[in-house]
Amino acid sequence: MYQDKILVRQLGLQPYEAISQAMHNFTDMRDENSHDEIWLVEHYPVFTQGQAGKAEHILMPGDIPVVQSDRGGQVTYHGPGQQVMYVLLNLKRRKLGVRDLVTLLEQTVVNTLAEIGIEAHPRADAPGVYVGEKKICSLGFTYPSRLLIPRFSAKR
């Protein structure tokens, strides 16, 4: 039976495609009694191209693979040293709207950075967290039928 718990999984360094497939499998197999989960992972070097991404957005990929993603946005680089958090939540069950979750995640990052002396802020015109004008944390979202999969990454 469902309890108000969120399981946190430390997955280490993993290929992007394997984690993406595992998230889809998790989503497809869960039911109303499944726990929500947070996955913490680093990826091998990869560019993920969201639904708004175009080939010309990737200027010089070199040997780094480019993988299509079902999230919104354009292109995001992931690689070792960059912490990615996948938040696998049933928003309906938690009575959260998408905007509520975005605000909660952004504020969590701002508060965490403040604890180590970094002054950061969200921006109303673009999801994510910024230090000055530079983005330090990106957020990307996927909307499967029953839940939202927000992803955010930050450089360490």
Image (cartoon, rainbow, N blue to C red):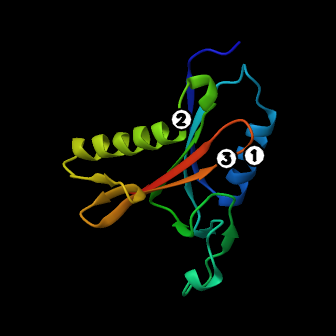
Residue kind at label 1, given as amino acid type: His
* Front-most of residues 112 and 121: 121
Q: Is residue 11 above or below residue 155?
A: above
Q: Which mark is residue 62?
A: none
Q: Which residue is mark 2?
A: 97
The mark closer to the camera, 2 or 3, is 2
Give the quadrant of the N terminus: top right
* Front-most of residues 18 and 130: 130
Q: Which residue is mark 1?
A: 24
Q: Classify 10 Å Cα crowding around label 2: few (below 14), some (14-19), many (20 and above).
A: few
The mark closer to the camera, 1 or 3, is 3
Residue kind at label 2, given as amino acid type: Gly
* Front-most of residues 114 and 100: 100
Determine whether, in the image, residue 141 is placed left or right of residue 31.
left
Q: Residue at x 69, y 69 (%)?
A: 67
Q: Which callout, 2 or 3, points at the residue further toward the start of the chain? A: 2
Which x, y percent locates residue 64? 61, 77
* Front-most of residues 145 and 113: 145
Q: Which mark is residue 143?
A: 3
Asked if the residues shown at circle 2 and circle 1 are in contact, with their CB atoms under 8 angstroms apart, the answer is no
Which x, y percent locates residue 58? 57, 81
Q: Is residue 35 above or below residue 78?
A: above
Which x, y percent locates residue 113? 28, 47
Q: Which callout, 2 or 1, points at the residue further toward the start of the chain? A: 1
Q: Residue at x 31, y 67 (%)?
A: 134
